[in-house]
Image: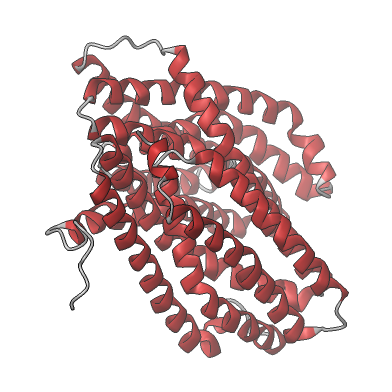
Amino acid sequence: MTPKTPPGLNRPGLNRQILVLALPAFGALIAEPLFLIADSAIVGHLGVDSLAGVGLASTLLQTAVGLLVFLAYSTTPAVARLIGAGQHRAAIAVGRDGLWLAAILGAALAVLGALCAEPILRIMGAEGAVLEAASSYLRLSMPGVPAMLLVLAASGVLRGLQDTKTPLVVAGAGFALNALLNWLLVYPVGMGVAGSAIGTSVAQWAMAAVYLVIVLKATHREELSLLPRWRGVLALTSTGGWLLLRTLSLRVAILATVLLATAQGPVNLAAHQIAMTIFSFLAFALDALAIAAQALIGKELGAADLPLVKALTRKMTLWGLSFGVLTGVLVLFTSPWIGWIFSSDQAVHQALSAALLVLALGQPVAGVVFVLDGVLIGAGDARYLALAGLLALICYLPLLWAVSLSNLSGPPALAWLWAAFAGGYLLARALTLLFRARTDAWQRTGL
């Protein structure tokens, strides 16, 4: 007897819907790292101290903004559910409230950053010329922080409206403007590090302005007030709090991994940073699938089409698993040569090969994690994601402790560190997400 195909799994156009959302999302996602690469490439020719200072300041800035990614992840499912339910006016109202929340948080973070920039950088170990460069870059970047958060919230709104092409166009134009302004202000104008920060802030505000025009036009078309509905802002804050906790647990896991790699010595640390860079790049592709999952799941839950929700979940999980296998094979076959792109040190190559072997084996697990994370975010299941993230972290920390107590060194030590990350932390996240996805409870959170 032939097993029955789940309803909707082979629905015509389902794969196309996923690709239409995921491919532009991938392009938009890599734009932000390209901003930092452009800044580093331009500032790098000013000298080692300038580059080190910008690197330190941008790391601090991106960490703070990264923790507030919930501005996109909370607006996407909220807007998508209302679109699925046919409540377009209410969806635009949620988007407006999300922008207000981003503006408020951005203003607060900008003021706090301007006041605390130098003390925080001193705590992080910056001094002398490096401290001067980092402080200048961070202080002058603060006016652009509200714009960065507005871009996050607005892109989340458009994703909820099933539009990932506009964020791609805006991000691409913003990157080009950022690179041009930075070069002009740093060299022809002669502003140095300050020019890089100002150029990036101007580019961020230009992107935010485009999004504000789009949302304001939609608000006017729906005859909505420009003022927020504070109950709606608080609702997004509540969901965002759980998503913030989820993101924080992930950041702690990554930071703890870096600290242990640092303790293993400079060679292993260098190899770990390269491996994590590769992992992060592959994560952008997986995150694009997760964004498609957020938008599609949210919309179908809004339409109360539970058979299609289940079909989409299975389809997206298979996509994540398949892409994980594909990228794992790619990493495995390129591992003997990929290290030369980043370093000419043979010892680093040996340690990197060990790490990449484990990374390759863990990619299918990562694929499932990213996609199911997107599915549950799309369902508004933020509380479970936060608690599951904490549980995964609790399981991971003893594994890190065990690796730190081992007498291993060199490539074997780094291999075991990555085994703890991929086979411990990521696997724990995968198991908690798969457990939740097999139940019906998460579907009710979106209804």
Residue 419, given in percent of the width and then of the height, sits at 66, 76
Residue depicted at 37% across the width and 21% down the height: 96
Number of numbered discs: 0
Decide if residue 70 is in sight here: yes
Residue depicted at 24% across the width and 20% down the height: 89
Q: Is residue 266 above or below residue 70?
A: below
Foreground pick, 284 / 398: 398
Residue 211, given in percent of the width and then of the height, sits at 33, 31
Residue depicted at 41% across the width and 52% down the height: 29
Decide if residue 62 is in sight here: no
Q: Is residue 341 above or below residue 117?
A: below
Q: Is residue 227 left or right of residue 183?
A: left
Rendered image coloring scheme: secondary structure
Quarter location, residue 444: top left
Quarter location, residue 97: top left
The quarter of the picture where the N terminus appears is bottom left
Q: Is residue 286 left or right of residue 192?
A: left
Q: Is residue 368 above or below residue 310?
A: below
Q: Residue furthest left?
A: 12
Residue 256, given in percent of the width and then of the height, sits at 74, 59
The quarter of the picture where the C terminus appears is top left
Residue depicted at 59% across the width and 39% down the height: 244
Residue 93, given in percent of the width and then of the height, sits at 33, 20
Foreground pick, 63 / 85: 85
Quarter location, residue 303: top left
Q: Is residue 54 left or right of residue 188?
A: right
